[in-house]
Image (cartoon, rainbow, N blue to C red):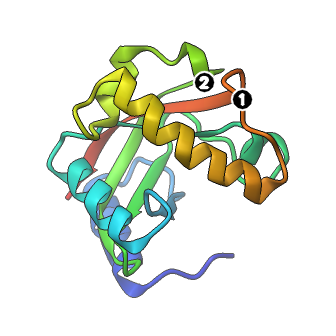
Amino acid sequence: MTIYKDSVYTTWQKYRNDNPAIPNKFEAWAFGDSAEMANELGNLVMEGTKTGTSSLFYWYDQGEEVMPSVGSHVVILDGEEEAMGIIKLVDVTIMPFNEVPETFAYLEGEGDRSLAYWRKVHTAFFENESVELGLEFNEDVLVVCEKFEVVYK
């Protein structure tokens, strides 16, 4: 069982008090690979600019992480692992990196929101993750694309 900071449990409990019918199950994580990135991307989520995220399918395929599913709730963490708010996954699609559409790149809410920008920053990010995993990144690698909505701030 993962142990989170008190703000995570407090935020989740406040949300559950207003929504008692939802299952008492959540994940908590931060975006990116640094405290600075977690703060920056978390703020984009909380202001409504960022409504999508992507990750390498390999993490889930190898059992490293639980595959995201529609209806799941995630407490978004900042760079200090404090709760920023809660999102609910509304769509999860698996596709090759080179087939991610411009519409999804826009939902990621980063940079100029173009597909060219998305490919540039995600190629670098996924290349680093691939090295960590002992894999070689290529544009056919499967990516998990998640769309979400903020349900609690």
Is residue 60 visible to us here? yes
- Lower sequence index among marks 1 and 2: 2
Query: According to the image, label 2 marks what residue?
Result: 97
Q: Residue at x 64, y 53 (%)?
A: 128
Q: Residue at x 52, y 30 (%)?
A: 145
Which dot, 1 or 2, sits closer to the camera? 1
Q: Position of residue 36 (x, y in %)?
A: 33, 70
Q: Is 69 displayed left or right of 60 in the figure?
A: left
User: Could you tell me the amino acid type at mark 1?
Assistant: Asn
Give the secondary structure at mark 2: helix
- Quadrant in the picture for the C terminus: bottom left
Q: Are marks 1 and 2 in contact (CB under 8 Å)?
A: yes
Q: Is 140 displayed left or right of 147 in the figure?
A: right
Is residue 54 visible to us here? no
Task: Establish if 50 lies above or below 129.
Answer: above
For label 1, the crowd category at 10 Å Cα-Cα, with few meaning under 14, some 14 to 19 and many 20 or more, is some
Q: Is 151 displayed left or right of 132 in the figure?
A: left
Q: Residue at x 39, y 73 (%)?
A: 35
Q: Quadrant of residue 60?
A: top right
Q: Is 110 displayed left or right of 126 in the figure?
A: left
User: Could you tell me the amino acid type at mark 2?
Assistant: Phe
Q: Position of residue 110 (x, y in %)?
A: 29, 40
Q: Residue at x 34, y 35 (%)?
A: 108
Query: According to the image, label 1 marks what residue?
Result: 138
In front of the other: 91 or 26: 91
Q: Position of residue 29 (x, y in %)?
A: 49, 63
Q: Position of residue 115 (x, y in %)?
A: 37, 22
